[in-house]
Every structure is written in C-alpha cells, then in structure tokens.
Image: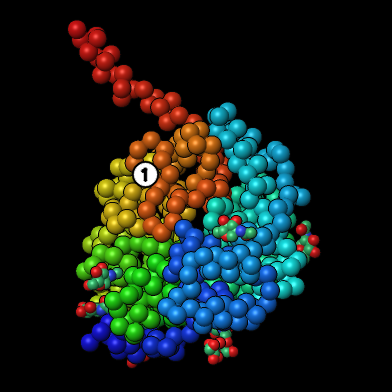
Amino acid sequence: MDWTRRLLSFSVVFCVLQKITHTVDLPPPCNSTIYCTGEILHHVQLAKIFSDDKHFVDMGLLDNPDKIRTTFLDLLNSSTSGIVDQKKLIQFLNTSFTQPGKEFEEWDPLDWHKNPNFLSHITDPELRSWAADLNDLWKSLGRKISGKVKDLPDRHSQIYVPNPVVVPGGRFREFYYWDSYWVINGLLLSEMYDTARGMIENFLYMVDSYGFIPNGGRVYYLNRSQPPFLTLMMESYMAHHHNVTFLRESINLMAKEYDFWMTKRSVSVQQYGKNYTLNRYYVPVGGPRPESYSKDYELAVNLTAGAKQSFYSELKAAAESGWDFSSRWFYGSTNTLLDTKTSLVIPVDLNAILCRVERTMAKFYTDLNMTNEASKFSTALEHRLEAVQAVLWDESLGVWLDYNINDTSRNQNFYPSNLAPLWASCYKNPAIVEKAVSYLEISKALSYQNGLPTSLKETGQQWDFPNGWPPLQHMVIEGLEKTEYKKAKEIAFSLAQKWVTVNFDAYKKYNAMYEKYNVEGDGKPGGGGEYEVQLGFGWSNGVIMQLLDLYGSRLTSSAISTPFSWIPFTLPLLIITFWV
Ligand SMILES: *[C@@H]1O[C@H](CO)[C@@H](O)[C@H](O)[C@H]1NC(C)=O
Ligand SMILES: *[C@@H]1O[C@H](CO)[C@@H](O)[C@H](O)[C@H]1NC(C)=O
Ligand SMILES: *[C@@H]1O[C@H](CO)[C@@H](O)[C@H](O)[C@H]1NC(C)=O
Ligand SMILES: *[C@@H]1O[C@H](CO)[C@@H](O)[C@H](O)[C@H]1NC(C)=O
Ligand SMILES: *[C@@H]1O[C@H](CO)[C@@H](O)[C@H](O)[C@H]1NC(C)=O
Ligand SMILES: *[C@@H]1O[C@H](CO)[C@@H](O)[C@H](O)[C@H]1NC(C)=O
Ligand SMILES: *[C@@H]1O[C@H](CO)[C@@H](O)[C@H](O)[C@H]1NC(C)=O
Ligand SMILES: *[C@@H]1O[C@H](CO)[C@@H](O)[C@H](O)[C@H]1NC(C)=O
Ligand SMILES: *[C@@H]1O[C@H](CO)[C@@H](O)[C@H](O)[C@H]1NC(C)=O
C-alpha cells in the first residue's frame, strides 16, 4: 500500500474536523496560467535560464496573459522536438516579460526617526552605533507596491496590498507572513508606528480578501500560509501604542484568521481514551511549487502520479511551517526531501503559537467588553492547554515533542521549537518548567559558540545543523527569560550574548545582516538549502533590536570583555605564578 493511501485511511480516523481533499488530482496553487500552472511555467523553469526559479515567477508581463500564452503555444507548436530552443525562449522572455523587482517603488518611510529611544538604553557604544545602523536599514528595506499592480493584477505575480511594507531582503522581494512579526517588533522599537500598523492592516486585508494570510505577497503563495502571527503582531502593536478603536475595527478579521486554522488545519487525536483537537500544517494542493519548480519536479521524477501529488503537497506544507526544509519533517529512509511528511506531524511550535493567540484573543475581547467571545477563547485555551500536555508533553525527556499522527510516536530529536510552550506560557503546571530547562541544559544544544542550532542533524537542509535562525533564538530566549528560574534567565542571557556576538562579528566583517548564521566558527552566515544565503535582513534586524532592548545594559560587543570573563583564563596563571 503506498503512503498516500495509508495517509487517507488514517485521515478518516483522525481528520474528522476537515474534509479530506488528498486525492490524485489536487488543485493548483493559483489559477494564473503563467505563474502557477501551464506550459510556459513548465518550459521556462525546466530550461533553467535563470539560476533561481523564483526569478521567472517574479517577472511582470508586458501584455495580457492570454496573448502571451498564445505567442508561446505558437512557438511550441512550431518546434519539432516539443521543446522551444534556448535562444527562442530567451527572445520570448525578453519581448513578453519585464525583469523582476519592477512592481515596487522604493519608499522612504515618513515615520522614520534618527534617534529612537531604545538606543539610549544600550550601554556598549559599539552596539549602540550598530543598532543605529540597523535603524537606518529600515529605509532600504521599505517598499511601496506601484499602482500598476493594482490596475493590472493579472500582469504581476505580486499581490496588491494598500500600505507600504518592509521586506526581508535579497530574493525575498515581497512581504512574508511570519518574518513580519519580528520586522514589526523591530519597527515598534524604532517607533515607526504607522509603518507597523500599515503592515498589520495589509495582513487584515489579506484575511478579508482570501480568508487567510498567504505565505508571502505573491499569487504563487496563495493556498499556503505560514505560522499564524497576526494576533501576536497586534499584541506587540498594542503594547507599544494602545488603540482600542483600531482593535475594535480589526478583531473580526483576526477571529476569521483563527477560524481558518481551526477549520482547515486541525486534527483530532485520541490519547488516553480522550479526543483532543490540535493543529498541523497541511496544504492539499498539487504541482511543483512555482518558485522552485525545477527542483521539485526533478525530485519527484521517479514517483508514481499519485505519490508525486502527495509529495508536492507535503513540500508545500513544509513551506507553510516556515521550516523549509528540515529533518523535522522527514519520515522515511532516504534522508532526503523525498521523506518530507509534514502533514503527519502535530508541531509543538504551531500549537504553542495558537495557545498564545487564544489567550491574547480572550484578553482583546475582554478589553472590548465582548464577554461571550472572550469566554469562547478562554475555553479554547483551556482545551489547548490540556491537549498540549496530553499529546505533546513527553515526561521521560521532560520537554514537549512533535507528535506523529500516523505512528503515534514523538520525535525525540532536539529542535528549539520543542521549547516554544515556554515562550507561549502554554502549560498549566509551573513545575514542568524546571524540567524543560534541564532538558535544554543537558542537551548538546547549548554547547555551540554562536547560539542555538536548529537541530543536531546535518542534512544539508537549511533548517538543520549548523544553521541558527533569528526567530528560534528569540522564542527560546524570551521563553527562558519569562520563567521564574534564575538558571533559565542565565541561559537566556548567555544565548542572547552569543547571538549578538555572531551577528555583530559578521556585520563588521561583511557590512551586512544575514537571514541565518552558522552556530560554529567566527561569524559566518548560514548555508545549505535551496538558494544562496540572503542579506538584508528583516527578521535578523528585528531580533537583534529586541535583544539589545531587553539586555541593553549587559550585552557587550566583544564577548571576551564581559565583566569577569577574564577570570577563567587568568586565574590559573595567577595561581601558578604565586605557587611558584
Ligand atoms: C505510517 O506508519 C506505519 C507503521 O508504523 C509505517 O509502516 C508507514 O510507513 C507510515 N507511513 C508514513 C506515510 O510515514
Ligand atoms: C481557481 O478557479 C476555480 C474555479 O473557478 C476556483 O474554484 C478556485 O478557487 C480558484 N483558485 C484560486 C487560487 O484562485
Ligand atoms: C499547430 O500547427 C499546426 C500546423 O501548422 C496547426 O494545424 C495547429 O492548429 C497548431 N496547433 C496549435 C495549438 O496552435
Ligand atoms: C534578454 O535576456 C537576456 C537573458 O536574460 C538578458 O541578458 C538581456 O539583457 C535581455 N535583453 C533585453 C533587451 O531585455
Ligand atoms: C486556494 O485559494 C483560493 C483563494 O483563496 C480558494 O478559493 C481555494 O478554495 C483554495 N483552494 C484550496 C484547495 O485550498
Ligand atoms: C486609533 O485608531 C483609529 C481607528 O483606526 C484612528 O482613527 C486613530 O487615528 C488611531 N489613534 C492613534 C493615536 O493612532
Ligand atoms: C473520538 O473521535 C472519534 C472519531 O471521530 C470517535 O469515533 C470517538 O467516539 C471519539 N471518542 C471520544 C471518547 O469522544
Ligand atoms: C530516478 O531514477 C534514476 C534511475 O534509477 C536515478 O538515476 C535517479 O537518481 C533517480 N532520481 C531521483 C531524484 O531519485
Ligand atoms: C468596558 O466597560 C467598562 C465598564 O462598563 C467601561 O468603563 C469601559 O470603558 C468599556 N470599555 C470599552 C473598550 O468599551
């Protein structure tokens, strides 16, 4: 029995809350016959004219899509081999498409300040001056979508949004969903309240238009989302700039996004004779990802038609998790992307995020005096707390672990996401906090010079060893810091110092901020995965700003100059000197 059918049979048992659409003929990611399906996409991507498949799907059209399609079909028809030769293909691209990046106008944020207050809390002068540079970087990452995208949407893969955005940077020339949480946290420290609010309003607009928030601002990202941070973006905004009127205007769309996750992304699991509802990443959409078309297509080349569609769907679910790609989703024996089975996993971090969303929604509704809705979310939170404890908590390791609904196993490997419930305060019994902290202490994960690794497995995937990622550092550090344990707070600070040091050293060396870093060595950007490491970089800048804000009086630009850090090196020498 192939795994699709196995999945189907399990689905019947477990996925009672959603209609199963996991059949061979899955719908395409979007209906554009240029950007999401069809002959042009297929031929251009497999011809590998550009080094990155994302290049083609980010190009704009010079004519209407039907005309361009006809031109191409004529070319195809006139070729005897069934393949348009490279020269003609390039000519076709030159006459029918614009280069990528043309849908934007550079945009200088009007609410930018030279000296936001958080800078004055940073004691180390080198770190303070670096933070001021990061504050400047918002200007180069700000983009406004040009009016032609609004007027001629079918000539662009860019999705129109009304307000300017801060993009991650590099090949990521559109907004991304979960990245924006840390971007917005950074913007708020920079006191750029209008830009932050505008980005939140864009996401609300997405929910209004599509019923959910896509992975990023491109049509080929419709039908998959990313970790659900909208409510937490609003939580951050309200903490800096409380505005009940804005909250009242937005709350329905926030509730609508939550409903999307609860209806389209939930699973029912039986444990100890009880049914629990939890969430997973799940994208029942077929075809290669348009922005990585040739890679997906070539990987699937030996699979049967049905297995191909399931594989494509699992890759998209991994992309929805934000961890594309990782050993975290591997179930199988090839140790390659072909083992990706994201939809079988109930992820700790997704459920921790939703736990915090439920608590925050209950609080928002309470602030708005809407008591019925508030109690609906309080009840949802109670259910979540029980489900997380029953299904994800592993008493023998003393930590939360991803749960596989197919074989009911928990993934025993280290991932920083295992600690996400600390960050979300997603537990009832405070005694388990101490266990989770000792899990971290005895794991090898604290032994790396530059921060927490994404896993301890080296697979060549970018969400694995030896890469460290900004959002994971932040969630673990904030999670440890908010506990009542001195030891946990010490670990939090030491992780923050490591992360600040590697970012700062790389910044001095390359004059750039990267999307990820190597947890080993002396300040190298991370590697692996599907594309070259990117610079910019939205969430990296946001996380550094948050750490500098949190520990501004204690962090130092050179880890060696930490007060008393000379003791371990010089004390033995002193002792020897005196002894002799
Ligand atoms: C589901 O679990 C069974 C039994 O453990 C295993 O044989 C099968 O390969 C698993 N299916 C998938 C898709 O991982
Ligand atoms: C594509 O078109 C079909 C049929 O009109 C529609 O049901 C579906 O929602 C569309 N999908 C997208 C992503 O627009
Ligand atoms: C392909 O070319 C042939 C012969 O020139 C023509 O009869 C046919 O209609 C063309 N097909 C398409 C799809 O344009
Ligand atoms: C045509 O395409 C090639 C390959 O992308 C590019 O080098 C060249 O600049 C393009 N010419 C025009 C006029 O766009
Ligand atoms: C894909 O997205 C479109 C537009 O949001 C929606 O109408 C359609 O139902 C989605 N399809 C699937 C399979 O989720
Ligand atoms: C609060 O939000 C309301 C409604 O969107 C808006 O009109 C008002 O200007 C906001 N107030 C502040 C201080 O931002
Ligand atoms: C749990 O859900 C399953 C599937 O819907 C159902 O058959 C079963 O009776 C439920 N069990 C309990 C204890 O509610
Ligand atoms: C597909 O099969 C061929 C022939 O066995 C093999 O050489 C190739 O490596 C396989 N490709 C993948 C992606 O598994
Ligand atoms: C909620 O109700 C209290 C007590 O009636 C009132 O003081 C407060 O202004 C109300 N808040 C909002 C946001 O309407």
Q: Name the residue rendered at 44%, 52% in the picture.
A: 532
Location of the C terminus (image quadrant): top left
For this rendering, which residue is in front, 306 or 480?
A: 306
Q: Quadrant of ligand 4?
A: bottom right
**Amino acid at pointer 1:** Val
For this rendering, which residue is in front, 282 or 445?
A: 282
Q: Position of residue 363 (x, y in %)?
A: 60, 67
Res 518 seen here: yes
Q: Name the residue rendered at 49%, 31% in the picture.
A: 557
Reading the image, the residue beneath label 1 is: 519
Q: Position of residue 255 (x, y in %)?
A: 60, 76
Residue 501 appears in which quarter of the rendering?
top left
Q: Position of residue 168 (x, y in %)?
A: 56, 54
Q: Secondary structure at mark 1?
A: loop
Residue 428 appears in which quarter of the rendering?
bottom left
For this rendering, which residue is in front, 487 or 34?
A: 34
Q: Name the residue rendered at 42%, 31% in the picture.
A: 559
Res 346 seen here: no
Left or right of 317 on screen, residue 258: right
